[in-house]
Image (cartoon, helix red, strand yellow):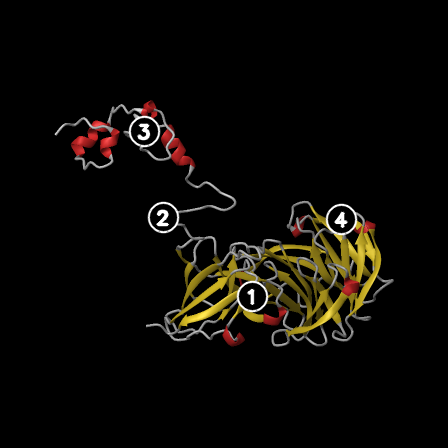
């Protein structure tokens, strides 16, 4: 058989590998090229087809991944990739929120300061939780402690460092620190004033000295017991045991008491706390907490305008510390509000509480897959993210996915909170099978970009 073939001959020939090799170097005329329907190429370009990138290859490459608008006529079989027909196993993600008085609980951790102070009135911590400071009305002194485990009061030990404030305040009731540890402030009722101190070595109370700066709050309250600073040092809050009110002050220069003035803003807590001894705020100034000596409770309030105490309202949320301390003088929060500490002169002890709530969420990203599986390790809230955008009134874009939910092997009976955008048959979400390693299967679809999802149970307790 001759190896020499024309392009015209190739239309019907059955060639061997040896014969096909002869294509390397073939010369075609115009008539023969016309047999390649729809290809624009010269004879010279066609001669490059043997493994060489030619202008024909460039034309073919340009068709891959190209975008077309308008009507497209297609004949033959069309294979189209879906939005993402892939499988993905997804785990839940935890989030811890602090300042949750509704879930507060005693952590069974405490530390006695009786060897230094038998009438402790206030407690405060370094911002990283490795140091603790206590002030009391017997010695009129601030004592410093080290925590070998940050924020764990049971690991505290006295550092043999202290500083007396007796020359300025004979009944010190409250203490707060500037966040960088270079200043601290004492409030008390003899006199009803706030005093400012500096430390030459940050957080080292033994290097403290009085700044000769004081600010009287006696025009607003009497028997001053607690204070708090806004995080930027431009607002001061003080509470007193006599008129049961929190007052707000403005500092024109941050952390400089000499620039303080009454902001003409206040909020009465008398309906809850008849002997308030301390005041705290959460990190963003939207929650306020007041310690009450008479009731042994910490009370929670919301501020509709952050840091504006005149906009406060009672949340009807409180927590009793009476099982540990019946005369609580002060409380403070630490570790991003996940822990609370209370001190009083009944037990002369600092008590630690948990004030955190941990929630779990599981996000199914529609851009990553449309076949999902998750194994529950806690009660979780489901999130559907990034569905394809909605289409037009006459041409919607739909997306569907399946979800396999597996219970843990311990038969914990974890639950799922589905998105509120899911419509279920009879408007009733399914109850998950609670047995060990139980498998439930669900399907969902949306055609409006996730505004509404339609959910269906494909099967439960699958074996």
Q: CA distance from mark 1 to mark 3?
A: 59 Å
Q: Are marks 3 and 2 in contact (CB under 8 Å)?
A: no
118 in relation to 232, above or below: below
Residue 306 falls in image quadrant = bottom right
Left or right: residue 114 versus residue 173 is left
How far separated are the C-alphas under marks 3 and 2? Answer: 24 Å
Q: Which residue is mark 2?
A: 76
- Which is nearer the N-term, disc 1 or disc 4? 4
Secondary element type, mark 3: helix
Alpha carbons under labels 4 and 3: distance apart: 84 Å
Looking at the rendered image, the quarter that the N terminus falls into is: top left
Closer to the eye: label 1 or 3: 3
Q: Which residue is mark 1?
A: 421
Residue pictured at 35% horizontal, 35% vertical:
37
- Looking at the image, residue 75 lies above or below residue 121: above
From the viewer's perspective, tell me whether residue 435 is left or right of residue 236: left
Rendering coords of residue 162 (x, y %)? 66, 55
| SS type, badge 2 | loop
N-terminal label among 4 and 3: 3
Outermost residue toward the right in this view: 219
Query: At which x and y percent is residue 335?
Result: 59, 58
Do tag 4 and tag 2 residues touch (Cβ < 8 Å)? no
Q: Quick one: label 3 or label 2, which is nearer the N terminus?
A: 3
Q: Would residue 382 be visible to someone looking at this image?
A: yes
Q: Nearer the viewer, residue 154 or 119?
A: 154
């Amino acid at each position: 058989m001759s190896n020499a073939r024309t392009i015209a001959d190739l239309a019907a020939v059955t060639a061997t590998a040896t014969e096909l090799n002869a294509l390397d170097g073939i010369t075609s005329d115009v008539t023969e090229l016309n047999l390649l329907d729809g290809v624009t190429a010269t004879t010279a370009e066609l001669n490059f087809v043997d493994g060489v990138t030619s202008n024909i290859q460039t034309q073919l490459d340009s068709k891959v991944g190209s975008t077309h608008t308008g009507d497209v006529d297609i004949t033959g079989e069309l294979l189209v990739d879906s939005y993402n027909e892939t499988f993905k196993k997804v785990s839940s993600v935890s989030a811890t929120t602090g300042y949750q008085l509704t879930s507060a609980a005693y952590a069974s951790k405490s530390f006695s300061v009786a060897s230094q102070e038998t009438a402790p009135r206030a407690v405060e911590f370094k911002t990283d939780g490795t140091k603790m400071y206590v002030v009391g009305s017997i010695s009129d002194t601030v004592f410093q402690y080290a925590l070998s485990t940050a924020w764990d009061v049971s690991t505290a030990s006295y550092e043999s460092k202290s500083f007396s404030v007796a020359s300025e305040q004979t009944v010190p009731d409250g203490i707060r620190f500037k966040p960088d540890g270079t200043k601290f402030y004492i409030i008390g009722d003899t006199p009803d004033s706030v005093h400012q101190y500096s430390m030459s070595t940050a957080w080292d109370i033994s290097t403290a000295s009085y700044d000769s700066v004081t600010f009287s709050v006696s025009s607003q309250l009497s028997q001053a017991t607690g204070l708090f600073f806004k995080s930027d040092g431009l607002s001061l809050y003080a509470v007193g045991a006599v008129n049961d009110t929190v007052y707000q002050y403005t500092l024109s220069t941050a952390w400089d008491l000499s620039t303080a003035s009454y902001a003409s803003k206040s909020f009465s807590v008398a309906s809850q706390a008849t002997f308030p001894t301390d005041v705290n705020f959460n990190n963003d100034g939207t929650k306020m907490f007041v310690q009450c000596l008479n009731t042994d409770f910490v009370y929670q309030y919301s501020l509709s305008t952050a840091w504006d105490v005149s906009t406060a309202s009672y949340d009807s949320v409180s927590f009793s510390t009476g099982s540990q301390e019946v005369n609580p003088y002060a409380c403070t929060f630490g570790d991003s509000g996940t822990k609370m500490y209370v001190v009083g002169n009944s037990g002369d002890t600092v008590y630690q509480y948990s004030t955190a709530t941990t929630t779990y969420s599981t996000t199914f990203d529609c851009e990553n897959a449309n076949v999902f599986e998750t194994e529950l390790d806690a009660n979780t809230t489901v999130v559907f993210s990034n569905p394809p955008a909605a289409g037009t009134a006459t041409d919607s874009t739909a997306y569907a996915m399946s979800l396999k939910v597996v219970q843990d092997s311990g038969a914990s009976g974890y639950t799922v909170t589905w998105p509120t955008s899911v419509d279920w048959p009879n408007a009733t979400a399914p109850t998950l099978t609670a047995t060990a390693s139980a498998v439930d299967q669900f399907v969902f679809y949306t055609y409006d970009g996730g505004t509404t999802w339609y959910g269906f149970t494909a099967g439960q307790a699958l074996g």
